[in-house]
Image: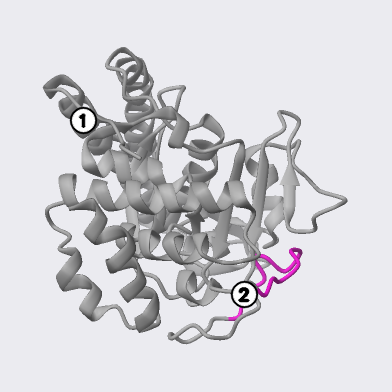
């Protein structure tokens, strides 16, 4: 099967670059705000009549006392408030610029990803979970096409389901711990869309009022190479033991900006494209795989391989497969023989 990629024109490349720079600036400012101003400065009256300057944590309410009211502590509080106002003003300015950028993204025709996918990863970006909760499955193609500077034919792109993997080798971020009162999957989804509820039939599937499925994959496997971190992010999701899951758990991560149908942006983290292609080729050969899924898996393996060979010059397939240790040799050999050589 042949694949047709429509290459970005110069105006689209420029707009995509501008959108990425602006969104990156916004996220940097937001993270700085969340880290610096997770507490407030208050005056507390002591029983002996004087006042103390206290730094009060917004989440826990715990207070750290900085000293009696004086010119020095007044200046500390003033500097804090000025700094907070300054960064809030920067955030407001960047938000306004991003609204204008959304219109330009639409105008230049680079709005590609489902708005639900962008909304989910925007929240993941805000909470610092980029490397913890990653996309697997067909939605990964949105990241690969953006990096390649091309548009993939719509028939090869995602359906209305979104698969997210909990990378157990990655710990919960500091920002997530600071901002979330509880730490479970359904609360995270409800921050994005309050209509998400757990499926009665599939315990790891969540469905919203628009019929979008999100499947949260919480691996049961202990085969990851890195040290595991204890976290309860997916504690309300049934752990799964899936054949081949260990390869996704140990895959290199790949991060790229995606732009939604509504013009909004987010960074999506997914599996490295080469390892995605190898995994999809292996998956397509599994005897218990549904025939239609088998065909789609093989097509995606070939499609991503073509993207790599034609539009990702920084990835040398023949060299990189020599260093991939978490796939069995026979799986890599099968990919090289069945897919890679056929693409040349």
Q: Residue at x 50, y 46 (%)?
A: 296
Q: Is 169 above or below relative to 85? A: below
Residue drawn at x 66%, y 53% as measured from the top left: 215
Residue at mark 1: 18
What secondary structure is marked by label 1?
A: helix
> Is 76 placed left or right of 287 in the picture?
left
* Horizontal relation, residue 4 to residue 219: left or right: left
Q: Earlier in the sequence, mark 1 or mark 2?
A: 1
Q: Which residues are magenta?
A: 230-241
User: Quadrant of residue 203 in the image?
Assistant: bottom right
Residue 321 sits inside the magenta stretch: no
Q: Is residue 77 visible?
A: no
**Main SS of the magenta segment?**
loop
Question: Of residues 325 and 207, which is closer to you in this image?
Answer: 325
Q: Which quarter shows the N terminus?
A: top left
Q: Nearer the viewer, residue 212 or 43?
A: 212
């Amino acid at each position: 099967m042949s694949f047709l990629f429509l290459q970005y024109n110069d105006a689209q490349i420029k707009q995509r670059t501008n959108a990425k720079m602006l969104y990156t600036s916004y996220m940097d400012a937001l993270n700085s705000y969340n880290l610096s101003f997770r507490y407030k400065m208050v005056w507390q009256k002591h029983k002996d009549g004087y006042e103390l300057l206290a730094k009060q944590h917004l989440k826990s309410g715990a207070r750290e006392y900085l000293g009696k009211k004086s010119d020095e502590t007044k200046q500390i509080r003033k500097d804090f408030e000025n700094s907070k106002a300054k960064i809030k003003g920067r955030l407001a300015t960047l938000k306004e610029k991003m609204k204008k950028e959304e219109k330009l993204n639409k105008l230049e025709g680079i709005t590609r990803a489902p708005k639900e996918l962008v909304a989910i990863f925007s929240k993941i970006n805000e909470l610092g979970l980029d490397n913890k909760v990653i996309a697997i499955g067909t939605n990964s193609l949105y990241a690969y096409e953006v990096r390649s500077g091309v548009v993939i034919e719509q028939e090869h792109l995602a359906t209305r389901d979104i698969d997210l993997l909990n990378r157990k080798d990655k710990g919960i971020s500091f920002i997530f711990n600071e901002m979330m009162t509880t730490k479970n999957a359904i609360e995270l989804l409800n921050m994005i869309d309050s209509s998400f509820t757990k499926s009665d039939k599939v315990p790891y599937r969540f469905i919203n009022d628009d019929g979008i499925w999100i499947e949260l994959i919480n691996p049961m496997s202990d085969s990851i190479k890195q040290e595991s971190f204890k976290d309860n992010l997916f504690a309300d999701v049934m752990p799964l033991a899936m054949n081949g899951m260990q390869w996704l758990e140990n895959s290199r991560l790949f991060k790229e900006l995606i732009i939604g149908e509504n013009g909004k942006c987010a960074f999506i983290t997914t599996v490295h494209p080469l390892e995605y292609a190898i995994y999809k080729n292996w998956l397509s050969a599994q005897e218990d795989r549904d025939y239609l899924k088998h065909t789609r898996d093989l097509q995606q393996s070939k499609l991503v391989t073509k993207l790599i060979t034609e539009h990702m010059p920084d990835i040398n397939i023949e060299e990189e497969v020599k260093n991939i240790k978490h796939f069995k040799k026979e799986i890599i050999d099968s990919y090289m023989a069945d897919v890679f050589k056929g693409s040349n």
